[in-house]
Image (cartoon, rainbow, N blue to C red):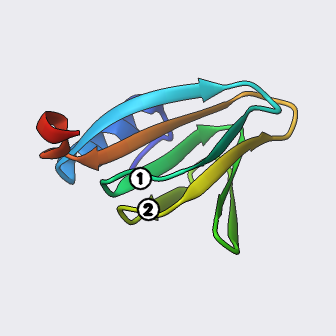
Amino acid sequence: MGLLQLSTLRGALEREGMVTAWWSDMPGTHVAPHAHDFPETRWVLSGFLRVTAGAETAELGPGDRLDLAAGTRHATDVIGLAPVIYVTGRPEEQRVRG
């Protein structure tokens, strides 16, 4: 894939037919459990993000990618001392309906 940078991650997801966005959250940020009606990908550029889906927990760091199915209830927490920067992707057709 090449060097880990924002444009590289977004380009890879866009080649998979996804609409992308990038996010930055501060240490200690918690996003309460929620679900989307579309599949979602999170790909971490820097920092660390914990994603909890039911009884499963994934701790993501630079270069880690997590794909969640539509309807997956999940929560996120920024862990560590640095902000997390990550790219999200969802299927292109969700741009109109989503």
Rendered view: 65 above or below 32? below
Residue at 66% x, 47% y: name it: 76
Residue identified by numbered label 2: 67
Residue at 50% x, 48% y: name it: 43
Rendered view: 14 above or below 82? below
Secondary structure beneath dot 2 equals strand
Which quarter of the rendering shows the C terminus? top left
Residue identified by numbered label 1: 41
The kind of residue on which mark 1 rests is Thr
Front-most of residues 70 and 67:
70
Secondary structure beneath dot 1 equals strand
Residue at 30% x, 54% y: name it: 38
Mark 2, other Cα within 10 Å: few <14 / some 14–19 / many ≥20: few
Determine which quarter of the picture holds residue 19.
top left
Q: CA distance from mark 2 to mark 1?
A: 4 Å
The kind of residue on which mark 2 rests is Asp
Q: Give the left or right position of residue 9, taking residue 34 as reference.
A: left
* Number of marks in the rendered image: 2
As drawn, the label of residue 11 is none
Residue at 38% x, 53% y: name it: 40
Front-most of residues 79 and 2:
79
Q: Position of residue 60 (x, y in %)?
A: 66, 54
**Which circle's residue, 2 or 1, is located before the other in the chain?**
1
Rendered view: 28 above or below 72? above
Q: Give the left or right position of residue 72, taking residue 76 as reference.
A: left
Q: Position of residue 24 (x, y in %)?
A: 60, 25
Tell me whether circle 2 and circle 1 mark residues in contact (CB < 8 Å): yes
Outermost residue toward the bottom? 55
Q: Position of residue 85 (x, y in %)?
A: 59, 31
